[in-house]
Amino acid sequence: MKLNDLTERNKKFQDAVAQITELIHHKSVLEYCSQLIRSARRMDALLRKLLATKNELQFNTVIESLEDESDEIIFILDQLTEFDKRNSTSVMKRMVKQGFDVISLYSFACDRLIASRLSKDEFDH
């Protein structure tokens, strides 16, 4: 999968999240969705920043930030799953699945970047 494909999937996920806010007018859902969109945007920006890192410190700092955003998204998706157990909607289920799929793809991309950098000994002195 190419970076632009991943960005496109991320945008589709953000669109799905925005749909939820139009359908479910619950304060906590609106707050969660707002945070999901911000975190999804940051994930994409951070992955691009990771690709441009020049040294090990930068790489580790960006990876840490990506992990934080990923954890935030997973936490919110879990919260929305709990909400949906009480208010079952197929739209919410699809969006949550889409979110977990996108997070998995970003995680896979990061794993590949880490493996690539390690195999090339890019940061060895």
Image (spheres, grey):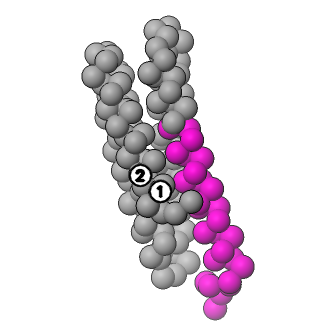
The secondary structure type at the circle numbered 2 is helix
Bin the neighbour count of mark 2 within 10 Å (Cα to Cα): few under 14, some 14-19, many 20 and up.
few
Q: Nearer the viewer, residue 3 or 119?
A: 3
Q: Amino acid at mark 1?
A: Asp
The secondary structure type at the circle numbered 1 is helix
Residue 97 appears at what percent x and percent y?
Answer: 55, 32
Question: Going by the image, does 111 lie left or right of 56?
Answer: right
Q: Nearer the viewer, residue 30 or 97?
A: 97
Residue 11 appears at what percent x and percent y?
Answer: 38, 46
Residue 18 highlighted magenta (yes or no): no
Residue at the outermost bottom position: 125
Q: State the quadrant of the N terminus.
A: bottom right
Residue 62 seen in the current view? no
Q: Which mark is residue 8?
A: 2
Mark 2–mark 1 CB contact (< 8 Å):
yes
Q: Which residues are magenta?
A: 99-125
